[in-house]
């Protein structure tokens, strides 16, 4: 094989890129995995994985003035803290512009946000894949649940998903490892909700990519809840713990960090991609790598950025722009609102460790076709119940024996949940290349022009009121709702901008995640999403990636690519 030539190039090493690398190498292809950021090796580079809160200079909670100055975007929400600051992208080195506010929280390193994700892992349902068609919104998905269900099973068996079997049509069950356990208050609330709403609403344990029994070379979750520092046990799914070792094992993988992909190289005569051009992030040297196929898995907006910056001599809007949809239909999940309250009783009960998971209340609105709200689609809730600790004593601090005794007594039970709602794919919600601003490597930055609209705003009313009602019906007291400031991007579930579809005139990708304009380029990360559902999307990215990689390998064998 000629130098700098591979069977496949995978751009990005996060959740989708790791899966693409694993699948393609295991099928015998020589794969180059490109990552724009630095390398992080499993275990060795998790430098703070065992560091307790009190060893951080500022107890990790509050950012310093310097951190706020250095991270003007990250400071907008919780990711800015001392614990894993090195995992988050420098806002100054990689800026973007905002026509409308968009909070873009990125991880540029090997593993990407697979090291920091929330690990909530849910299948989409037939309801989700049919929604656009039934509602007359955007375009129809080119696939249905039956097309992806076997691939959900395939990736679940590999990553390890703990959860409970519920037989809910709107939330299909996965291939489960044993579930984590609801605590005593959560069980009580779950039972009362089920009874009051006649099983039309259900509180269940969250479904998470945490192994609850040993799987391959991974040790069961230790209930430390220090996940986003990296996990030496491989207790949760990440590229480092799961897909990368599998790809390396084949002997077919070349990993190259510090490689910023500038463009996909396009041959006008063959109408195929020939590889990619990169900028070395450390030396600024440009170089080209050749391949038969290219998988863009750089995270939703970065994959679209690469397409926009490619083949501009053929298409003004870049590779994949012939439909006029490239960069459009950006989505996130809207949230940061819900309800909480106190719960009397069960003072003799507590819980084990620091469960890195909460409860989940699956979508119930607009599931029944006869239900008509003043909005379409729906939402789910993530939450937990816990007991207040020593913090409750600070306001009336005692001294000596009384203080010591009071600190040994857990406080009251409290319970709360945050709603996550679906955001519709609006054509006018878009990203584009800024015509003026460049990053430190001289590349154009993205401009964000995304907002929530009336459907989401109407949904918010139910998202708060319903949770308040459920808690009150379950016996909670002093229940109150809350709504914090939200801007698109805060969900860290950015999706769309290179959507799948059935027609090259109205979509960027076909049903196999191929770019209509260039069939040997595949996009399998969040960019490909045609709608957003209301559940965490990462499992769907994994399944789509495994499915597309299998298709690509078969087509290569047939000589079709």
Image (cartoon, grey):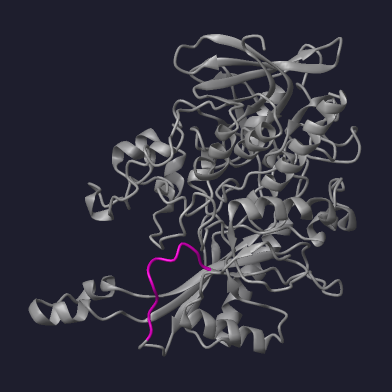
Q: Residue at x 51, y 74 (%)?
A: 181
Magenta span: helix, strand or loop, mainly? loop
Q: Quick check: can you spot residue 315? A: no
**Quadrant of the frame with the N terminus:** top right
Whether residue 353 is in magenta: the answer is yes
Whole-percent x and y of residue 382?
56, 66
Whole-percent x and y of residue 362?
67, 69
Q: Quick check: can you spot residue 134? A: yes
Relative to 135, does residue 530 appear above or below in the rendering?
A: above
Residue 53 picture quarter: bottom left
Q: Residue at x 38, y 85 (%)?
A: 349
Answer left or right for 538 relative to 245.
right
Relative to 499, does residue 487 appear above or below in the rendering?
A: below
Answer left or right for 425 relative to 244.
right
**Quadrant of the frame with the C terminus:** top right
Whole-percent x and y of residue 12?
59, 31
> Is 139 in front, or is 287?
287
> Is 530 in front, or is 248?
248
Q: How many marks?
A: 0
Answer left or right for 237 relative to 390.
right
Range of residues picked out in magenta: 349-358
Whole-percent x and y of residue 329?
75, 41
């Amino acid at each position: 094989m000629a130098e700098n030539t591979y069977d496949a190039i995978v751009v990005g090493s996060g959740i989708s890129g790791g899966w693409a690398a694993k699948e393609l190498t295991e099928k015998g292809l020589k794969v180059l995995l490109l990552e724009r950021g630095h390398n992080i090796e499993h275990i060795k580079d998790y430098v703070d994985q065992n560091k307790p809160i009190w060893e951080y200079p500022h107890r990790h909670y509050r950012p310093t003035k310097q951190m706020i100055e250095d991270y003007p975007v990250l400071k907008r929400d919780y990711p800015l803290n001392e614990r894993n600051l090195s995992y988050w992208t420098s806002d100054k080195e990689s800026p973007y512009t905002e026509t409308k506010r968009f909070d873009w929280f990125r991880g540029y390193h090997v593993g990407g946000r697979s090291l920091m994700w929330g690990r909530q892992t849910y299948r989409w349902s037939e309801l989700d894949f049919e929604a656009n068609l039934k509602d007359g919104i955007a375009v129809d998905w080119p696939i249905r649940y039956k097309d992806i269900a076997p691939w959900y099973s395939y990736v679940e068996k590999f990553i390890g998903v703990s959860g409970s079997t519920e037989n809910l049509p709107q939330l299909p069950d996965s291939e489960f490892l044993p579930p984590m356990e609801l605590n005593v208050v959560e069980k009580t609330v779950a039972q009362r909700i089920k009874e009051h709403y006649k099983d039309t609403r259900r509180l269940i344990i969250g479904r998470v990519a945490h192994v609850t029994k040993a799987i391959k070379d991974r040790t069961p979750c230790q209930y430390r809840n220090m996940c986003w520092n990296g996990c030496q046990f491989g207790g949760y799914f990440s590229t480092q713990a799961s897909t990368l070792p599998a790809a390396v094992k084949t002997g077919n993988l070349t990993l190259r960090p510090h490689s910023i992909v500038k463009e996909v190289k396009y041959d006008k005569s063959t109408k195929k991609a020939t590889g990619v051009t990169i900028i070395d992030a450390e030396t600024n040297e440009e170089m080209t790598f050749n391949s038969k196929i290219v998988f863009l898995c750089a995270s939703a907006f970065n994959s679209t950025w690469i397409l926009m910056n490619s083949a501009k001599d053929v298409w003004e809007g870049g590779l994949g722009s012939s439909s006029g949809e490239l960069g459009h239909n950006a989505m996130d999940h809207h949230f940061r609102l819900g309800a909480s309250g106190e719960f009397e009783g069960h003072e003799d009960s507590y819980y084990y460790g620091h469960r890195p998971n909460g409860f989940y209340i699956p979508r119930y609105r607009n599931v029944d076709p006869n239900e008509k709200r003043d909005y379409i689609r729906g939402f789910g809730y993530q939450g937990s119940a816990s007991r207040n600790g020593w913090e409750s004593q600070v306001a009336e601090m005692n001294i000596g024996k009384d203080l010591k005794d009071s600190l040994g007594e857990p406080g009251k039970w409290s319970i709360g949940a945050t709603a996550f709602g679906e955001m519709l794919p609006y054509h006018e919600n878009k990203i584009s290349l800024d015509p003026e601003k460049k990053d430190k490597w001289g590349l154009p930055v993205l401009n964000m022009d995304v907002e929530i609209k009336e459907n989401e705003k109407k949904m918010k009313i139910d998202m708060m009121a319903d949770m308040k009602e459920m808690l009150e019906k379950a016996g909670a007291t002093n229940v109150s709702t809350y709504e914090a400031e939200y801007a698109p991007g805060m969900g860290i579930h950015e999706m769309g901008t290179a959507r799948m579809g059935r027609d090259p005139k109205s979509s960027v990708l076909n049903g196999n995640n191929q770019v209509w304009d260039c069939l040997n380029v595949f996009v399998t990360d969040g960019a490909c999403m045609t709608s957003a559902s209301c559940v965490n999307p990462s499992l769907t990215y994994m399944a789509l990636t495994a499915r597309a990689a299998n298709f690509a390998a078969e087509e290569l064998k047939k000589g079709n690519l």
